[in-house]
Amino acid sequence: NRAMTQKKFASQADLVEKKVSFDKLSDHAYAYTAEGDPNTGIVVGDDAVMVIDTQATPVMAQDVIRRIRTVTDKPIRYVVLSHYHAVRVLGASGYAPEHVIASRDTYDLIVERGEADMKSEIERFPRLFRAVESVPGLTWPTIVFERRLTLMMGKLRVEIMQLGRGHTKGDTVVWLPDDRVLFSGDLVEFDATPYTGDAYLQDWPATLDAIAALEPEKLVPGRGAALRNPAEVKAGLDGTRAFVTEMFASVRDGARAGKDLRTVYRETYDRLKPKFGHWVIFDHCLPFDVSRAYDEATRHPDPRIWTAQRDKDMWQALEG
């Protein structure tokens, strides 16, 4: 069975290592990006360092730490989880942080489905879980906040906020108001396909509006290059919005017409491929994206839990 699934997930054939960039965006903000692989954000305060999203394993976190140590020797005191997905959180122990910060909704998702998510993500994306045996287990927050938390890192004010649902119900952004830099997690992607398997697709555009209303001048997306000026930030917001809204509209129209999931998937793939097909992980994400959109458009307002078996069944049904 395992041999069969190796041919199935588009991501399992994805073995090429990506080139890492470590970019300074302000005196306090850095972006660790890797050509469409999951990004990590870094905030250097007066007395400590904050890491936003951890990479997938503690071994992979060591490369982030190595880059941080080229710019500061301050202790890494805080890890912020933009949401609960394994690829974002399982490297946390590598930083030995004093505090792991997450929204209440993210905490609840870890309780409810963290274990299932960890198993399914590791099977979907083997390359992104280098040295997976170094993961000690689920990452548990030590600080859980409701809607908004202001953290003073010396004189630097850091706003950790839930602006609305989108990629998940727990989505959290980190905002440096003095520097006008925002770390969005997977609410915003750039030249990378949004994964919407756990999304609230009808809410997502309003959450993007809330990000835009902050008027960030620079933005670190969940995947893709750091956005370095307002025009690039707008392009990231607009591209993410276009994918989310066009994909959902296509699926909703098909569902309303009584078409089955496989037919809707094929029609949506053909509709989106010309515009978005060159984005990173398009072929991998779209079956999950359409499956969630079909659920939301029909009878499941909340995302169903993805298990490793559900992944395989879905992939077989749509790609088999």
Image (cartoon, helix red, strand yellow):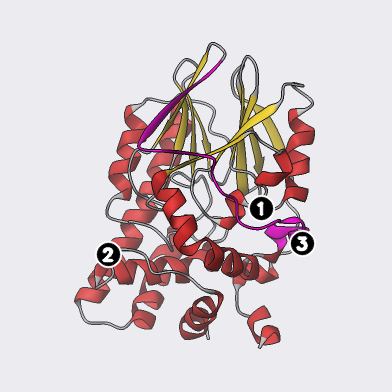
Residue type for callout 2: Pro
212 lies left or right of 81: left
Query: Residue at horizontal 52%, vertical 84%?
Result: 316
Q: Are marks 3 and 1 in contact (CB under 8 Å)?
A: no
Nearer to the camera, 144 or 22? 144
Give the foreground label among 3 and 1: 3
Q: Is residue 18 above or below residue 118?
A: above
Helix, strand or loop under label 2: loop
Residue range corresponding to the magenta coloring: 127-153
Query: Residue at horizontal 36%, vertical 26%?
Result: 214
Q: Is residue 49 above or below residue 267?
A: above
Residue 133: give its label: 3
The numbered mark, 3 or 1, whose residue comes first in the sequence reads: 1
Task: Give the residue furthest to the top.
Answer: 155
In percent of width and height, residue 308 lies at 56, 75
User: Split into 4 quadrants, where in the image is the N terminus?
Assistant: bottom right
Kindly identify which residue carries mark 2.
301
The numbered mark, 1 or 2, whose residue comes first in the sequence reads: 1
Q: Label 1 crowding class (10 Å Cα cut-off): few <14, some 14-19, many 20+?
A: many
Quarter of the image holding residue 47? top right
Helix, strand or loop under label 1: loop
Tell whether position 129 is magenta.
yes
The numbered mark, 2 or 3, whose residue comes first in the sequence reads: 3
Q: CA distance from mark 2 to mark 3?
A: 35 Å
264 lies left or right of 121: left
246 lies left or right of 136: left
Q: Is residue 20 visible?
A: no
Query: Residue at horizontal 47%, vertical 15%?
Result: 178
Residue 56: give its label: 1
In percent of width and height, residue 81 lies at 53, 43
